[in-house]
Amino acid sequence: MDINQNQNQNQNQTSRRKIEQLRICMEKEVEVGENCFTDVKLVHVALPEIDKEAIDLKTEFFGYSFNYPIMIAAMTGGHPETKRINEILAESARTLGIGIGVGSQRAALENSEHEDSFRVVRDTAPDSFIYANLGAPQLKEYGIDGVERVIEMIDADAIAIHLNFLQEAIQPEGNTDARGCLDAIKEVCTAIKKPVFVKETGAGISYAVAKKLHELGVSAIDVGGLGGTSLAAAEIYRARAEGDELSEDLGILFGWDWGITTVESIVECSAIPFPIPVIATGGIRNGLDIAKSMALGADICSVALPFLEPLMARAHTDNVIKKIEKMGEELKVAMFLTGCETITGLKEVEVTVSGKIREIMEQRNFLERVKRRKKTISSL
């Protein structure tokens, strides 16, 4: 096989994988069994002394004002069939005044024909906060020029560098050479004038890694914790369809419970010295989960699968908008019952952690950090 044939095969493989993963997430069981947020409780305030109708959900993030503390998480793009989905998601973000990210733009770097499936997001939401997206291994492959290209492609306001080495380790075609990623991320943070944040994709980020990322100069951390959609588990179905028994077995062994839960990761990432904004992603399914995330230390939440599910019934913007508005109302109720008029007030809310999550947090000495942080906030 000559070089051109090999390049074409890789391009087709990346694009095909994008639509396969999307279909699997929409049609198969890809969520981990345990919801880490069930171990977290917000302390009820019997006399909230506020008017629920006066509660303000507005949130500031990277200098942008959102009407809800929610972003539509990076999901898709890179295949012709994903264009309409990105258009619907972008229209929802524009209508409700929230942020949105696109899926990995690797496919568009490999083949410019796929750029339109990403560009539609900016075309549809010209004034919305939109972030570009590229994997850490691709930083070494495409360099700063590649990063600038994906930003320019959608006139992005920020760029996310995603980490998905769990998924890569299970894919037969996965890129498992993680050497040099720290240096590559540092180079991006130095060269790119837009905000740069790093996001996990389902296995969480620990305190130690968050501290390294902060030292590299990242502007925010998206925890992408264990607790929601498992892209590694999605690889089980791809492997099964291909008759790849080894990849299927690896997916079964690691896909369902490997990683740091979203709850733990929020606490650990928000505990680093000189903290930076923390985005909570992974298993957030309703407004109460959002409230719990903010109480644990998150600054904003990001949601993916719940916004895909309405599209299964009928691919229409109204379905996504209704889902987001419902989350907003659920969040308002949680804020009312904890006496919070603003999103920032959620950081002071009393919270209890029990079960397995508490045991892990105690072993890693992070439970006391939550208590100390809340006392500090309350004294300001």
Image (spheres, rainbow, N blue to C red):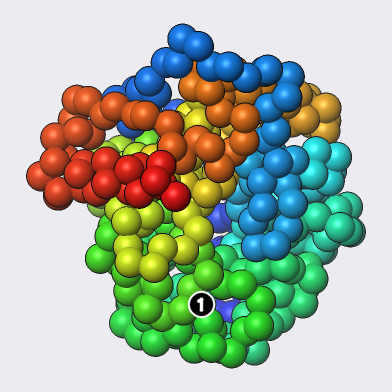
State the residue in front, 261 or 276: 276
Q: Is residue 345 visible?
A: yes
- Which of 187/380 is in front? 380
Relative height, residue 222 to residue 97 (above, below): below
Could you say which is closer to the camera, residue 193 or residue 232? 193
Residue under circle 1?
A: 138
Q: Amino acid at mark 1?
A: Gln
The image shows residue 8 at horizontal and vertical percentages of: 63, 76
Q: Is residue 364 left or right of residue 9?
A: left
Residue 249 % position (x, y): 25, 44
Instruction: State the residue at coordinates (50%, 31%).
Output: 291
Whether 147 is drawn above or below 204: the answer is below
At a point 59% along the width and 90% down the height, the residue shown is 191
Residue at horizontal 32%, vertical 74%?
212
In the figure, residue 7 lies in which quadrant? Answer: bottom right
The residue sitting at 39% across, 68% down in the picture is 274
What percent of the width, then of the height, locates residue 94?
84, 46
Image side of residue 205 versus residue 53, left or right: left
Looking at the picture, how far across and down is residue 290, in whole percent?
A: 52, 33
